[in-house]
Image (cartoon, rainbow, N blue to C red):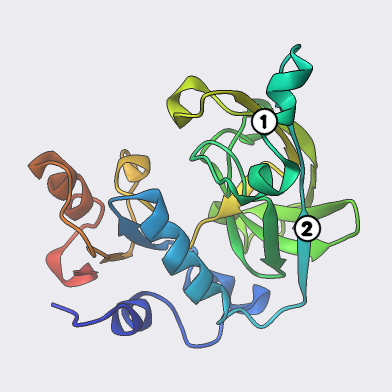
Amino acid sequence: MVCDIANLIDFVYPQQMSLANVDDFARKIILCPRNEDCRQVNRTVLQRVTGAARTYTAIDTVVADDVDEIANYPTEFLNSLEPDGLPPYRLTLVVGSVVMLLRNLDPKIRLCNGTRLVVTELRRNNFKARLLADAGEGQDDIVIPRIPLSSSGDDDLPFTMRRVQFPVRLSFAMTINKSQGQTFDRVGLFLPSPVFTHGQLYVAFSRVRDSESIKV
């Protein structure tokens, strides 16, 4: 049992993380019951990544024909929202950081929703990345573009929001549900609140091959 989030992160990730030691953390993850817990962990772990950093801001609009409805939602309000299916308005990336795709870009080369990547280069209008699973195998960099993304009915918004942003979010941590079907060498289980079902707890403990590779 680990007593706090700092010790849990120490169990999973090295103190200094960079593109040079990506193999040290490519098959490790922190699992959380909720997306807001993941965001907290991801922001904390990002501070350990020592590469060049850049922050990208999105363009947010309401999708509606009614001008009055659009006027009900100021841009500043839209910028403050972070629905589960959309990237953040303000996306800070560091060379060497781990991200997850939120949309299918090119399934033929495994660029699918849920694929994890490691950032290799940050540019003004796009960034480059590699598939995390193969990051140490000399693969070519992939250019990730900004694209328009729309909120879905699952996001519990009373309107449809359109956000132009890179279709990724940080992925040093992910939700327990998102981890189903994957196996990791080391897992930290962050439970600031109870899991929703006993099944979730089973899924979390099933992500590793032995009990020594997971801590709560």
Quadrant in which the N terminus is drawn: bottom left
Q: Position of residue 92 (x, y in %)?
A: 69, 64
Whole-percent x and y of residue 110?
61, 35
Q: Residue tagged by mark 2?
A: 56
- Residue 56 in which image quadrant: bottom right
Mark 2 and mark 1: Cα distance apart in space = 26 Å
Task: Please tell me whether residue 135 is drawn above or below residue 166 in the rendered image.
Answer: below
Q: Residue at x 43, y 77 (%)?
A: 13
Task: Tell us which disc is closer to us: 2 or 1.
Answer: 1
Q: Describe residue 147's horizontal placement relative to residue 205 as left or right.
A: right
Name, please, the residue furthest toward the left: 198
Residue 18 lies, in percent from the top left, at 63, 78
SS type, badge 1: loop
**Residue 144 figure quarter:** top right
Q: Amino acid at mark 1?
A: Asn
Drawn side of residue 202 relative to residue 49, left or right? left
Q: Give the residue furthest to the bottom.
A: 15
Amino acid type of the residue that numbered disc 2 sits on in the rendered structure: Tyr
Looking at the rendering, in which quadrant would you find the C terminus?
A: bottom left
Side of 1 where 157 appears, left or right:
right
Secondary structure category for the residue under label 2 = strand
In the image, is 98 to the left or to the right of 209?
right
Q: Is residue 180 visible?
A: yes
Q: In this rendered view, identify the residue nearer to me: 146 or 162.
A: 162
State the residue at coordinates (42%, 68%): 41
Q: Is residue 194 above or below residue 179?
A: below
The mark found on residue 72 in the picture is 1
Choose the circle earlier in sequence order: 2 or 1.
2
Give the residue displayed 19% in from the left and 82% down from the top: 3
> Tag 1: Cα neighbours inside 10 Å, few (<14), some, or many (≥20)?
few
Residue at image position (37%, 41%) is 178
